[in-house]
Image (tube, rainbow, N blue to C red):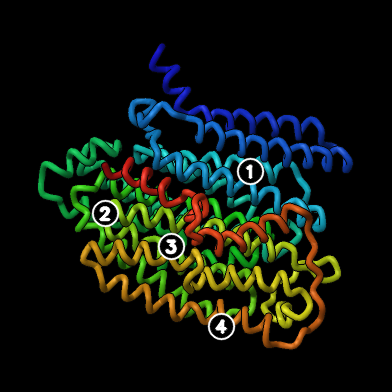
Amino acid sequence: MTDLYADLGAVLPEIVLALGAMLVLMIGVVQGGTKQGEEHAARSANVLCGALLIGAAFLVWRDDAGAREAFGGLLAIDAFAAFAKILILVGAAVMLALGVDYLKRHDLMKFEYAVLLTFSALGMCLMASANDLMTLYMGVELQSLSLYVIAAFRRDSIRSTEAGLKYFVLGALSSGLLLYGASLIYGYSGSTNFADIAKAVAVSETPIGLLIGIAFLCAGLAFKISAAPFHMWTPDVYEGAPAPVTAFFATAPKVAAGAMFARAMVEPFGAITDQWSQIIAFLAVCSMFLGAFAGIGQSNIKRLMAYSSISHMGFALVGLAAGTRAGIEGMLVYLAIYLLMNIGVFAFILMMTRDGAQVTRLADLDGLAKTRPGYALGVAALMFSLAGIPPLWGFFAKYQVFQAAVDADMAWLAVAGVIASVIGAFYYLNIVRRMYFSEPGEPVHLAGGFAHRAAFAIAAVAMVAAVAPAPGFNGFGAPEAAARAAEALMP
């Protein structure tokens, strides 16, 4: 009985999310039925689910019981999982708050949106703590099933329906690849638990069937992180889904997938890093260059950010490909900075309207510096940081993963990353050029409330302030937290 209480205490944040989301779902059903009731239920759901997400993040932060396993080794509770969960939960709460204004303007205020987003965050937390292939799959599917629905949340839009359908079909394919890889790994190791797999891998020569299983597992995980060549869903889903959904896709799920990828490779297969690091390096190179080249010709900012996410996930995978503690630390720092950069960018995108309708063309940014100089300066800071231009925070994120690759005798991968970064800088700098050197076109109204302006301003200022040498500003504690998380994963 003591073990059961200990296990339940270890997953208290997940229990809070699960029970809270189910309670909000029932409240929404009871309150609904009329137009006024649905609106009230949606408002209540947004507030309650936001509180659940922040509350769960607080519980994760306050957990000082140390590293441990729960439910017979199915879940790992450690600093690595805590780092990822806090980013996931805070990112999800911010995106939930930023989406309210858009949902109101487009008559999409439904209580199901907040509930689905919360269940998705629950799946992501399981992904970050997964210590078994079955737990990993359960987390992936709980996240994915929720995201399939909210991708098609705008039912009167053909693009949104198409986005949900494409994501569902391709997601089912990726789940099949992941399960096939897991079955091969189980067949050759005799277990689905990461610790048992690690023991089996360490005591004998690696059979070719196990390597094939790892390759299929990587393919399934690459889909979730939008890594090329398994990226095909990303541009269409980003463009077709409602803007708040796209913003959510670009933030918390990327952190969850990156953390899951790292744990699924390092813990069970740490003894054969040289076998799988080449697969990760291939995914990183494909992602960096495809995102860099394909983004150049885009005219829709949501689609451009899709290719940007593909490229940035490639940069993050450079750290994982290194297979060292420094590489994992660099990857975690990269994901944290990427999360903040995208919160700022999508907070601005969600504010862009004309005649009450969302606008997402790059041409709508023309001459912004002449009409809204403060906003243009903030967007420029975020674009320079995404491009990795020093001395902004985004530069140090790339520098850390490249340095880890060089230290792991993979200098060629760092060189490839630098080249891809230079190529990709074109479309970020093109946005700055449009804002400062083009004549204003049809005026764009920047709607949105305090939450949008605060998120945008905080993200933009952080890109500059984080590199200040003053105490409390140098990375805002992210490098130290990432170092502790990496040490928990790779003692």
Number of numbered discs on residues: 4
Image quarter of residue 219: bottom left
Q: Which residue is mark 2?
A: 324
Residue visible at 48% across and 65% down? 394
Tell me, for residue 116, which label it has, or none.
Answer: 1
- Say what secondary structure mark 2 lies in: loop
Q: Position of residue 40 (x, y in %)?
A: 83, 39
Horizontal side of residue 160 vs 42, given as left or right: left
Q: Which residue is mark 3?
A: 397
How many C-alpha atoms fall within 10 Å of the one at disc 2: few (<14), some, or many (≥20)? many
**44, 30: nearer the viewer:** 44
Residue visible at 29% across and 36% down? 193
Discs 3/4, front: 3
Q: Position of residue 466 (x, y in %)?
A: 52, 58
Residue visible at 73% across and 52% down? 451
Residue 249, relative to residue 385: is it above or below? above
- Say what secondary structure mark 3 lies in: helix
Comes first in the chain, label 3 or label 1: 1
Q: Which residue is mark 4?
A: 297
Badge 2 amino acid:
Thr
Labels 1 & 4 near each other (Cβ < 8 A): no
* Residue 265 visible somewhere in the drawing: yes
- Say what secondary structure mark 4 lies in: loop
Discs 2/4, front: 2
From mark 1 to mark 2, how far is it between C-alphas?
36 Å
How many C-alpha atoms fall within 10 Å of the one at disc 3: few (<14), some, or many (≥20)? many
Residue 161, relative to residue 419: is it above or below? above
